[in-house]
Amino acid sequence: MSTRAQVRFATREEGVTFSEHPNAIHAQFYVHSDGYPEGLGLEIAKSLVNPDYGKIHNWEIESLDAKHGDLEYIYYIWQAPGKSTWISIFKVGYGWCDSCNRPVDAIDECIFVGEPSNLIKKYGSQLDE
């Protein structure tokens, strides 16, 4: 089973919170598998912290308007010149309608906000357990 995700790049701006989906993004990629924080999240964070980490593979560039009904996570990489990079991770919300027996949209849950080193601390330690 694949864990699908989108990775979106947004600009750090005054008044825009990291714990909500921003109105504007500048690039978007689709990741078909291993999109969970202990996989893709760590890969993103390690690539930002360590320039010798290597390239990230299997990202598909998408139109900024592309929508998916099968995502499990959405990542935002927040950057601006002269400021540190931050990452937000949202667990995509899906519910189930018992009366119509179909999936329905629910509210996405922000499960992580922080700098790449904090993501490594949080999700990297889970791999050690």
Image (cartoon, rainbow, N blue to C red):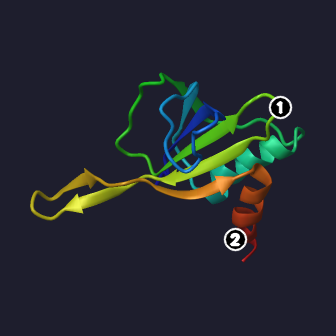
In the image, 90 versus 129, the foreground residue is 90
**3D distance between C-alphas at marks 2 and 1:** 31 Å
Query: Left or right: 23 with respect to 70?
Result: right
Q: Is residue 97 above or below residue 115?
A: below
Quadrant location of the C terminus in the rendered image = bottom right
Question: Which SS class for mark 1?
Answer: loop
Is label 2 in a helix, a strand or a loop?
A: helix
Residue at left offset 85%, top offset 43%? 53
Residue at the (15%, 59%) spot, across then down: 101
Residue 47, given in percent of the width and then of the height, sits at 79, 42
Q: Which mark is residue 3?
A: none
Residue at horizontal 42%, vertical 53%?
A: 108
Q: Dot 2, how many residues are within 10 Å of its Cα: few (below 14), some (14-19), or many (20+)?
A: few
Residue that lies at the very extreme toward the left in this rendered image: 99
Determine if residue 34 is in view.
no
Q: Mark 1 or mark 2, which is nearer the start of the sequence? A: 1
For label 1, the residue is 82
Give coordinates of residue 123: x percent, y percent: 69, 63
Q: Residue 26's quadrant in the figure?
A: top right
**Disc 2: which residue:** 126
Place residue 39 in its image quadrant.
Answer: bottom right
Q: Label 1 crowding class (10 Å Cα cut-off): few <14, some 14-19, many 20+?
A: few
User: Residue type at mark 2?
Assistant: Gln
Location of residue 74 with respect to 101 vertically, above or below: above
